[in-house]
Amino acid sequence: MATLIAPSNHSSAEDAEALQKAFKGWGADDKTIIAILGHRNVHQRQQIRKAYEELHQEDLIKRLESEISGDFERAMYRWMLEPADRDAVLANVAIRNGKKDLHVIAEIACVLSAEELLAVRRAYRHRYKRSLEEDVAANTTGHLRQLLVGLVSSYRYEGDEINARLAQSEANILHETVKEKKGNYEEAIRILTTRSKTQLVATFNRYRDEHAISISKKLLDNQASDDFYKALHTAIRCINDHKKYYEKVLRNAIKKVGTDEDALSRVVVTRAEKDLRDIKELYYKRNSVHLEDAVAKETSGDYKKFLLTLLGKQD
Amino acid sequence: MATLIAPSNHSSAEDAEALQKAFKGWGADDKTIIAILGHRNVHQRQQIRKAYEELHQEDLIKRLESEISGDFERAMYRWMLEPADRDAVLANVAIRNGKKDLHVIAEIACVLSAEELLAVRRAYRHRYKRSLEEDVAANTTGHLRQLLVGLVSSYRYEGDEINARLAQSEANILHETVKEKKGNYEEAIRILTTRSKTQLVATFNRYRDEHAISISKKLLDNQASDDFYKALHTAIRCINDHKKYYEKVLRNAIKKVGTDEDALSRVVVTRAEKDLRDIKELYYKRNSVHLEDAVAKETSGDYKKFLLTLLGKQD
């Protein structure tokens, strides 16, 4: 379930007018900006952007960028993009940041459905005049490249069929890769980049049954510092249960000294219209603290107001 | 230009009736079947199939399979499928045939546009309940797997931009891979599976300028018997000039002792509505024999009649 609270009746023209008014004078009226855009769904935001362009011959996103700043601006910018375009931007940023962010590529590739991932590849091509896999491949090497290129290029089967024998044999192959650094990387990559998610979950379950530990935990035990294993870990977690994965991203972002605003914004902005309510519940279960309270404690100003709005806080 | 001759005015219902009549009695009236289906474009064939199903509660393709046989049947079956579905079938047959046919996978992946290839992946998933890359990966290993999976999963950028410096540096990388068996496979695979076709053609041109031989010829010199190099060769030829590639497939299929009907049918059926006329011209230029005459000499019966019809022979 989503956390976004959006009215069913709104007028794009009136919203565009109100935003224009909020931009007037010295310093924007951030409260109004949040009150409007923090309460509109993706379709409504695109309509407002269109209405604003027609009324004022100016791109609303560009105007927002010049009116606001910092973490608030970055979060708002991402919020204003269509989901596929937003993920294309997030993927590009991750590629440019290199090593430390490459797991975001695995996240995007493994959380999305086959058609959603394809829409991101289309948006990426349109925006950057290169293919997503081209940029990933040009900025990575070895097994990490093979894994990430395979993940972003996948168009997985999405039926419910499970092949139990295959799950058994491929759980064994994954075990070989996980338990020692000299594992059968190629086969592990083939399995994770081509099998259907339903089949993979069955394989992960077989793994847990045999080894009394989940494959993602086992991975953490061993080689969490290695980039390849980190991406592998992200891929497995996102395929297995992306909501639990996001809960952990939020937990880590919040508990980090200084707070990881990029990760925090990424999860809140990309999930607010999808399943952020479920993620919030998982967060509370795991931390005995409400996500809104944790976010409020670690952030401030308009950025805080905006995140809390997307988290479903009633004004 | 296409070779197919299809009337703009036809009635699907009348065609369906005429086909039903042709099926009656002992042995089908193949002449009528060819006269109708060999002169209908993809849209018309789908309409006839629909009309036939409605009129006779029977799938036209299934009926055709039971009425005709041999090379004629196989060619007609492929002709009756929609292009993306047909390519999905061709890819699956190639995977099942293994080694000797894997270059067909490279052919399909490199000749089609990004969206066309995607349509094939969609059709494959729908038909076989697995993804195309999944089946390719499960039936290959090593560099051949990396190359083929990369090719079928690609969604290349299709703009006209050329980066001349990149063409130079990547021509050098390809040269390393081609000149010795211990080449930098990984980088060659990255280049061929992710760069735009326009960029790759510029890279191949740089190669030729530097080495006074085309990269595909150079590949043939060295290791034509190796599966990986064979697929690499096919990929490069299809990206560089797929019509010249198809001319050669036809030439080899015809001059082979016993004729390679699978290859012959594949090219005629898949290109008849696209650019078979251009391929015919290339064939005549290269062999000083008209393709129709060569095909007529090497084939017989209804199969011959059908191919010649698709090749644009006036009845």
Image: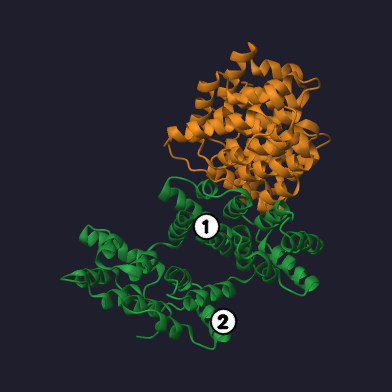
Chain colours: A green, B orange
| Depth order, front residue of A121/B211 | B211
In the picture, which quadrant includes the C terminus of chain A? Answer: bottom left
Residue A46 in percent (x, y) is at 36, 64
The residue where tag 1 is placed is: A99
Kindly identify the residue that appears in the image at 60 percent across and 47 percent down: B153
Horizontal side of B79 relative to A121 (left or right) equals: right
Pointer 1 chain: A
Q: Which mark is residue A146?
A: none
- Please determine if labels 1 and 2 lie on a single subunit: yes
| Depth order, front residue of A149/B132 | A149
| Depth order, front residue of A112/B253 | A112
Does B2 sit above or below residue B110? above
Does B116 sit above or below residue A250? above
Does A213 sit above or below residue B121? below
Q: Residues within 10 Å of mark 2 (few under 14, many from 20)?
A: some
Q: Secondary structure at mark 2?
A: helix
Residue B9 in percent (x, y) is at 53, 35
Residue A15 in percent (x, y) is at 27, 71
Disc 1 residue type?
A: Lys
Disc 2 residue type?
A: Leu
Distance in Å between CA atoms under marks 1 and 2: 29 Å
Does A291 sit above or below residue B194? below
Kindly identify the residue that appears in the image at 55 percent across and 21 percent down: B211
* Furthest residue toward right: B26
Q: Do the numbered discs 1 and 2 sit on residues whose CB atoms are within 8 Å?
A: no
Kindly identify the residue that appears in the image at 62 percent across and 71 percent down: A241
**Can residue B154 be seen here?**
yes
The residue where tag 2 is placed is: A282
Q: Mark 1 or 2 closer to N-term?
A: 1
Q: Quadrant of residue B43?
A: top right
Horizontal side of A216 relative to B285 (left or right) equals: right
